[in-house]
Image (cartoon, grey):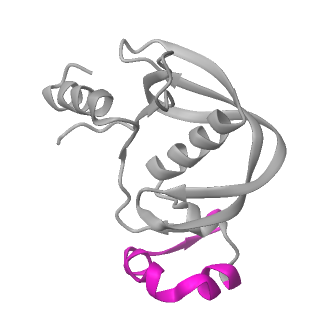
Amino acid sequence: MGVSKRLLTIDLSLGKTQKISWCSFNPEIISSDGKVYDEEGCLSFPEIREKVTRYAKVRIRARTSMAKWFEMDGEDILSRCLQHEIDHVDGMLFIYRMSALKRDFSAAQKFARCNAMASVNSPRGTYMTNPLRLIFCGTPQFAVPTLKSARSGRL
């Protein structure tokens, strides 16, 4: 694609009339509070849903499509979604937030394709050797125009 940006789009409308979606660049968590142990899933592994620990509340800092910095608070599902998607652009998958025993016990065959991609260990966890840097969460109606804009260099 030729664009070196950590791009995150999120759509939490979930069929509601109020549209809750946005696009941000280079998101980072700047503060957090509390912990929540709850079930999580991922489109990368649609057959897997397991409990993982995440922060209860987060504050992120990111840039808009117009390159303006902004900060945003998230809690509940928004907090979990932000953390999950920021992990993705950093090359971290939610299954690596599970204990090794749980990951292995849950079903080694389900993780085979992930284990083939992930082989770099660091103090922060196991990361993919060739991390995916572009993540879309939400409907194709939201994600596709954003991707086309990024590809054309307008973002």
| Quadrant including the C terminus | top left
Is 70 placed above or below 108 here?
A: above
Seen at 70% across and 63% down, the residue is 51
Seen at 27% across and 29% down, the residue is 141
Residue 66 image point, x, y percent: 36, 12
Seen at 47% across and 51% down, the residue is 88
Q: Which residues are magenta?
A: 101-125
Is 17 placed above or below 105 here?
A: above
Q: In the image, 16: left or right of 80?
A: left
Residue 67 image point, x, y percent: 40, 15
Residue 114 colored magenta? yes
Residue extending farthest to the right is 34
Residue 41 image point, x, y percent: 55, 58
Residue 152 colored magenta? no
The residue nearer to you, when weighing 54 against 125, is: 54
The residue nearer to you, when weighing 127 against 140, is: 140
Residue extending farthest to the left is 152
Which secondary structure type mostly characterizes the magenta part of the structure?
helix
Is 53 placed above or below 58 here?
A: below
> Which of the 4 image quarters holds residue 83?
top right
